Image (cartoon, rainbow, N blue to C red):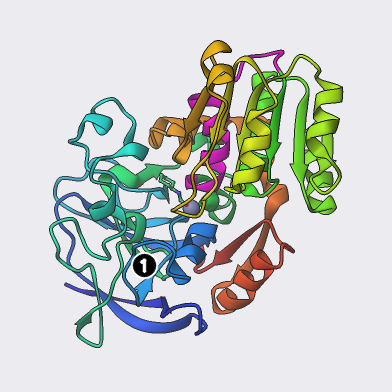
Amino acid sequence: MTTNAQAAICRGHEQPFTIEQVELADLAPDELLVRVVACGICHTDLAVRDEQLPVPLPVVLGHEGAGIVEAIGSAVTAAKPGDRVVMSFNSCGDCPSCAIDAPTYCYNFFPHNWSGKRADGSPTMTLAGEPMNANFFGQSSFATHAIAHQRNVVKVPDSAADIPLERLAPIGCGLMTGAGAVLRSMEVRAGLPIAVFGAGTVGIAAIMAAKIAGANPIIAVDVNDGRLALAKELGATHAFNAKDDAPGKIRELCPQGLGYVFDTTGINSVIEDAWGLLAPKGICGIVGASDPSAMLKFNESQFMGGGRTVMGILGGDSDVGPFLCELIEHHLAGRFPYEKLIRTFPFEQINEAIAASESGEVVKPVLVIGKE
Ligand code: CXF
Ligand code: ZN
C-alpha cells in the first residue's frame, strides 16, 4: 500500500523548493517507513541543488532526518513501529569498507545514497504517478514521511527519551562528521594542539570533540567573528580571524607546531597553510568540499621526514549506530552542547531556512516537519 506524503521538491538553484504531494512505494524487506518529525539542513543538500554533486534533479533532499517509525519491512530488526529514530547515510553492508565498519567509504556509496533510486534501480517515490528522484542518503527527509533502511536508522536510546527529535535530527551528518574526524579519524591525543579551519557545524563539532579528547590549545580560525565567538564558547581556547594572519599567530602560539590541523573549508590555500603548521607526526585532516579539479602541493621532505599525514575524511569515519549513540551520551552529559548551533523553522519555511544558512546567520537550521 503506497503512502501519501508532502515533500519539498528541489528543481535546481534557480527555483525555490516547493512542497508537493508525493507517493511513497511499498517497503522492501530491509526498509522502514518513518514519519519525519524534523530534519536538519546541511551544505550537501545545497551542493546538490547547485548541481555540484552527481545527484539527478528534480529530487527530494534532506539527510538529517529524525522521526517515528510507522511500519517496517519483514527483515527489519533495527527498530519497530513507534520507535523514535534518527537517520544517517546509507551503505551496502557487503563491500570491504563495510566489512570493517567503515561505511562512510562504502564502495557502493553512490547507488545507495545519490542515484535518486534504490540501489536496484527501483523508485521509492512518485509524483503524479511518475518516478521522482529520492532515497537521498537512504532517506529524503525533507518530507512528512521517508523510506529509510536498516543500515541508516538508529533507534534513539532510552537515555535520550527527553531530548526532542528536532534536536536529535542533525546528529547524523555534519555533527557526526566533525566530532568523528577528531575522535575516530585523527584520534586526537590529549595535550596536543589542534587548529580547526572553518567554524560551521563541522568545525564547531570538531572543536567540542577536541575538548572532549583533551587537546590543548584548541584554535578556531574563521572569517566570521560571530562564529569565532561561538567556537570559543564551545571549547576553543583561542580564536583567530583568517583575515588577520592566522598562520602567523598560530606559529607564535605554538612554535613547535601543531599535532593536528583540520580543514572544513575545502580552500586549497587554507589547507596548504594549515599543513605548513604541523609538528612532526602531525595529521592534516581534510573534510571540506573542494573544487573537484583542485590539486594540493606539499613539500615532500617535510611530508616524509616529519612523518606527517594528510588524511581525507568522510563522515568522521562514523560507524553510524554506535558512534551516534556515543555522541548522544556526550550531549546528555553536557560535553557536546550542539543545541547552541540550532535554529528551528517550520517545514513551510524551508526556503527561509536555507537563506539563513547561506547568509551565515544560522549555523544549523532544522526544519520542524511533524509533531512528536
Ligand atoms: C556525508 C559524506 C559521506 C559520509 C556521510 C556524510 N556528508 C554529507 O553531507
Ligand atoms: Zn550532510
Q: Quadrant of residue 328?
A: top right
- Say whether residue 126 is left or right of residue 67: left
Determine the secondary structure under disc 1. strand
Which of 301/282 is in front?
Answer: 301
Residue in the picture at 58% in, 28% down: 284
Which of 97/1 is in front?
Answer: 97
Mark 1 residue crowding within 10 angstroms, few (<14) / some (14–19) / many (20+): many
| Quadrant location, the N terminus | bottom left
Residue in the picture at 81% in, 17% down: 255
- x then y, percent, for residue 187: 54, 20
Q: Quadrant of residue 191?
A: top right
- x then y, percent, for residue 220: 76, 37
Identify the main secondary structure in magenta.
helix
In the image, residue 262 lies in the stretch drawn in magenta: no
- x then y, percent, for residue 74: 14, 50
Does residue 154 appear in the picture of this structure?
yes
Residue in the picture at 60% in, 20% down: 188
- Dot 1 amino acid type: His
Give the residue pinned by disc 1.
145
Which of 247/228 is in front?
Answer: 247
- Say whether residue 215 is left or right of residue 315: right
For the record, the magenta segment spans: 172-192
Q: Is residue 305 above or below residue 64?
A: above
Does residue 187 appear in the picture of this structure?
no
